Each structure stands twice: as C-alpha cells, then as structure tokens.
Amino acid sequence: MLDRDVTREIFEGISTEGEILFYALTGVATLVFFVGIGIRLRKYARGRPQGVIGSPLGFARRAARSSVDTAFNRTVAKRDLYAGVFHSMIMWGFIVLFIGTAILTLEADIVRPLAPQFSFYWGAFYLVYSLVLDVLGMAMLVGIAAMAVRRARRPRQLDYSRVDIAPATTDRGGFRTGDWIFLGWLAVLGVTGLVLEGARILAHDFPWFEVFSPVGWVLAGVFEAVGMNTAVAEAVRSSTWWGHAFIALAFVAYFPFSKAIHALADPVNLALRSPLAGQRLPVLATTGAMPADGHIGIRDLADMPWKALLDLDSCTKCGRCHVACPAVASGAPLSPRDLILDLRQEADAAWSILAPLAERRSDHPYGGAATRGDGGLPADPGGGAGPNGGSRVAGGLISADTLWSCTTCLACVEACPVGIEHVPTIVGMRRSLVDQGIVAPSLQTAFTSLAKQGNSFGQSGRARARWTDNLPTPIVDARKEDVDWLWFVGDFASFDVRVQEATRLVARIFQAAGMDFGILYEGERSAGNDVRRAGEEGLFEVLVEHNVGQLEKARFRRIVTTDPHTLNTLKFEYPDFGGEYEVWHYSQVLAALLASGDLEARAPIGRRVTYHDPCYLARYSKVTAAPREVLAAIGAELVEMPRNGANTFCCGAGGGRIWMDDSGLTERPSEQRIREAMTLPGVTDFVTACPKDLTMYTAAVKATGHEDRLLVSDLIELVATAVGLPLESAVLREAQPEMELAAADGQPG
C-alpha cells in the first residue's frame, strides 16, 4: 500500500546548523545569479532602440513558435539530427532535474512548514517523481557523453581557428576551455546526483519502492557488489550530499557568466527574431540609427541595437554559420561566428560591472585600433573609441576587409539555431564604413554610376531598353498603356550581354503565352537591393524614390522580375517607402503558364540537369518549388545539388561583391559550386534562375575548365527549347548536342 512511508527525508542527516549553512549558500548563489542577469540586462539597455516587438498578436505568434521550436529542438536538429537528439536529452534532463529541485523546495520550505496537511511528496507522487527524474537524469548524462565525444573529435564547425588572422597570433583556447567546463560541470552534477541516490538506497537496505529509481537501484547494487556496506554507504551519502549541493549552487552562480546563459537568452532571441531578418533592413530615419553627432550606421558599440547585443549573448559557438558561409569557404577574412564572438568579447569588456573602469580587451590583434587598411581600402581615419561612448567596431575591431567580404547570402541567419541576425549587423557596420569613406575604388565607381545613370554598368539610362531592339513584337510601355503585369527587368538582365539573350527569350515566351505585360523602359533604375546591402543607404533611398515615382505613373496589377535581388527589395523593402506591390519571380509565372496550358512543352528536352537555387530566391523569398515545377513540366531530369533549397550555396555576387575585386580569394564561391555540380554523374546543364548567377557561373565554368562538359543555362533557355522557340546564341545551339553526347558516353562528373 502506498502510504506516507513511501518517501525519503529531504534533509536526511543534516543538522540545523547544516540547513542554515545550506540556505545561506543558496542565498549567496541566487544573489550572484541575479547580479549576473542584471549585468546582461544593463548591457542590452545600452543598445539603441529597435522595434522588434511589433504588434502584440504578431509577437505572441512568434513567441509561441519559439516555445515550440525550443521544446522540440527544431532549430538545433535542422540539418544536424545528432546534435538535435542529444541536445534535447541534455536540455530536458536539465529542465526536469531543475523542476524536481523546485518541487523539493516547495515541499520542504513552503508546504510542510505552512500547510503540512497538503504535503504531497510521498506515495504515488513520489514513485512517479523518482522514475521521471532518474530516467531524465540518465538521458542528460548520455547526451553529455555524446556531445563530449563529438567535441573531442573537433569537427570543422567546432574548430575555433580564425580565418582572418594567423593562428600563432591569437589564442582561442579560452573558448574550448569554457565549453568543456560547462559540459563537465553538467556531467558532475548528474553523476553526483546518481551516486547520492545509489548510496542512499544501499544505506537504507534497498526499500522496495526505490526500484522506481532504476538507475540509483542498479548503482546501489554495484556498490554492494564491490563490498560497500550500509555504514560506508551512509558516509558516502552524507559527503556526496554536501558535494552535490556545493556544485549545484556554484553552477547557479556561474550560470549568467558562462555559456549556460544561452538557455535563457536563446528562446527569447528566437521569439524576438524578425520574420524578415535580412530581407527587410531597418530604415535609418525610423530606427534611431542616426546618433547625435550625425554619423550613420554601427560605428561604435553604442550604435548597436539592443536586439543585436542580445544576439551576441545567444551565440553558442556551434559553428553552423561558419561552415555555411561562402566567405569562409573562399578564404576571405570573414567568419560570421568570429564576428559575433569578437563583438561579444568587446561589449563584455567595455560594459562590465566595473565599466567605465574596465580595460579594453587585449587579446584581439587589432585591439580596437585602426584597421590595417589593406585590400585597397583606406585606413580608418578615427580608430579607437567613438565619441559617443563605446568602442570603435566598424573598421576597428572588425576590419573593413572582413565586413566587405560578406555576400549577404543569408546562409548564416538561415543556419543559426538561436535566431542571430548577422546580416543586419554587418550591413549596419558597412553603412558606417561608407559614411567614413572606407570604400574600395571599384565599389565607389559602381556607386557613382548608379547615382548618375541608375545602373552599375556605366551606361546611359536611355540605353536600358536597347535589348528590346529587333524583337519580333515590341513590348508595351507600361507608363503609357494599362497592363496586367509590370516586368521590372533589372540591371544585369538589361545590360549584361550574356544575360540579354535570356532576357529576350523571357519576352518572347511571355508574348507566346499571351501575357499582357509591359516595362518601364528608361524610366526604370536599379531597384537598389545590393546598393543597400553594400551600405549606401542614401543612394538606395534615391533609387527607391525614383522607381516608386515611375511605378505610380504606370497602371498594372502585379510585378514580375527575373532578378531575385530585385524581387526581395520590391517585395519586402519598398513597402517601407510607400511601394506596396504583388511581386512574382518569373519562375512562378512560368510554372503557372505551363500548368494552365497557356504555355505548352511540345518537345520535352529530356536532358539530365541540375538546378542551382539562388540565395535571394530560395533563402530570401522562400521560392524553391516553382523552378522545379517548370523543369518537371518541360521534361528535364533533375539531379539535385548536394546543397539545395534553403541550404543552397552562394555564387559570391550578392551584397555588392559583384562590384568588388575577388582575385585574393583562395577559390571563388561560383567555382566551388561548379565543382560541386561536376560530382553529379551525367548532368549536362547547370540551370540558373538569376541574372547574376548566369553571369557568375558562365565565367566559373570556364575558369574551372568544365565548359566542354557542363552548359550553364538560364531556366528560360530550357523552356524556350521545350516550347519550340529557337535559341538566340549559336554557342548554346551548338553546345547542347555535345553536352548530351558527353553524358551518354558516361564521362565522369
């Protein structure tokens, strides 16, 4: 029968003096914990205001999603099931053990002294309590062991070597030490708890109900088997009780000053993460991003928004952003992980509890001083600490070369399991570099051309629509006639010679399908997506003002574009400037035309192809199905790239990188991607759906020596072949049979 004897004494063998000591230590640990939390909150309060909460309903939805993601470890398990499973075991083991401790506190300190008639820590409750805590405690230890094995093997994502500095000049060993301390501390907590339980069961001569503590029961049997008697077991129990208590209370005090803080910061950060992180960048005039002294962007620590400071503390150093980053893979001096950790160390040093007495960190080779100024970039004219308080970060702690290496592909943001928004922070610092004049000459040339002509090619704006010359059917001027679709063509589709071939095919396909569409002709200018991500916010706003004015003159229902970069900024950013539009990518339009029968694949191409997901289409706009639907409809055999969909790899052109020198890279991202495609047997076509991709990969296939084996094609070129529309380029017409022959011969991929 389950009566009140089915329980255990909470402070068994502990004297009154011992209990007083325990509660005193608990008070000290709790005080230190809240002081540590206060230091963290004080740091966030120093950040600039940022409207991340949004509407109460919207935030409630994000918070609910964050809670579910955290509970089920969805973001941790994404593309890393090993980490997801064992992290879940550690997390839930720790949570359940913490809840178990809270239950003991409730019983011992509130119920028994104040309302003993409501005592519950006995009988059936005790049995269930014991079983759950035993099983979850053991699960936590298994998870810790699995993670320790993984960490000992030191996979690439857990290698803390820097990409921007020679290893001999910097020591990242402190990170590894901190990780092992955190993991080891949890392990010792779990082991001492089980040892305590096993010794107690043996000391009490195996009470029948303690079988509901299966791990402790087995451990008690082991102790007995090695010769431990009840007296020794009692001595072990007593000493282990105090050891376990000291370790647990020390962990409470250690918690806010260690990696453990992520357990609190990460769920909050996930809830606060913008659903358009990176897609819609903050507008300077509405974010408090313009400080009193007039400088723009994130120049100093004090310019960082509070959410960005929370990002820093949320980082667990998992390295997923590091291995996903094309800059890291290409040998550029940027790792999103290192950038976040450098900023975190700097903020902690500058804004510790002793600030302003705290000294600046000294382990970073730049030490917050002026940037090296290499790579053709002028040195930071200021360096050191900013006049508005805080430490110089843009061009100081974080070098200009590092910041300009980012392609803004959003791989880091998409891969991060804890909601860190790397790209907005990087762009914020780029804005400061532009404000300081720390801009490479080639980028400045592009800015100048965009300001004067509305495009980065240095050509007259009046030449924007020359690609329409000699089309069999003229294209409607949407400024003069009503149209259903307004085609926002974009710079590369209008001016790049190779891309113009695909652009003309898009026009002919749209016309063949009977679409009612028009263009803005010379009224169109660059949509400004990459201008903005290169940090030239003022120029971006000038381009937006012009384009919105032109679009207001036109009469249309929706916009279509072949350029994913244009798609992103028109769809997500123009609404902040009065431009609310329904925007489609041309792959979505093609898929709809093929599905409706308005476009018919009369001669299915029957070729074995692979498709490259553009970053700005798959990650930014979440469009992955439409291009594949088109390929299926025209009879192509699709072989997926190893990295596809939202996990795609970058071509290296985004964020203004297409206007910058990349000769110093170990290997360009586009060339790495072509080599990846060459591992796919029998593939004849590398299919793109982005004008910049078509440009980058056409060059990359030549640079890697695979142009005789792999044909880089725009999606529209395959569609044109399938519907019987003759291709414009003799190179494309002649290459196709050779590609098919190579595939049939089984040449190695």
Image (tube, rainbow, N blue to C red):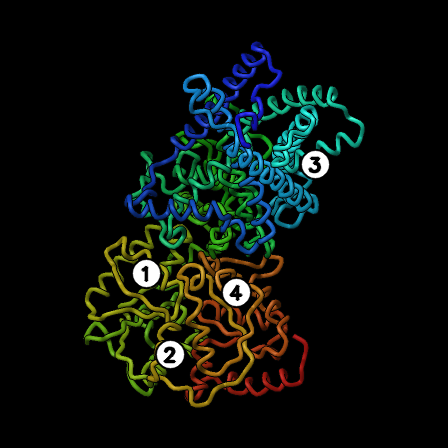
Left or right side of 715 for 608: right
Nearest to N terminus: mark 4 or mark 2: 2
For the residue marked with disc 4, what is the amino acid?
Asn
Query: Which marked residue is nearer to the observer: mark 3 or mark 1?
Result: 3
**Marking on residue 644:** 4
**Could you tell me residue 705's position as x and y percent?**
63, 73
Task: Please give the residue where the numbered disc 1 appears in the rendered image.
Answer: 571
Q: Quadrant of the C terminus?
A: bottom right
Q: Is residue 437 visible?
A: no
User: Distance of mark 3 from mark 4, alpha carbons?
Assistant: 48 Å
The image shows residue 434, relative to residue 15, as above or below, that is below
Residue 494: which quarter of the image?
bottom left
Residue drawn at (66%, 19%) of the image: 238
Residue drawn at (53%, 50%) of the image: 376
User: Distance of mark 2 from mark 1, alpha carbons?
Assistant: 21 Å
Secondary structure beneath dot 1 equals helix
Residue projecting furthest to the top: 17
Task: Please give the residue where the numbered disc 3 appears in the rendered image.
Answer: 218
The image shows residue 185, relative to residue 356, as above or below, that is below
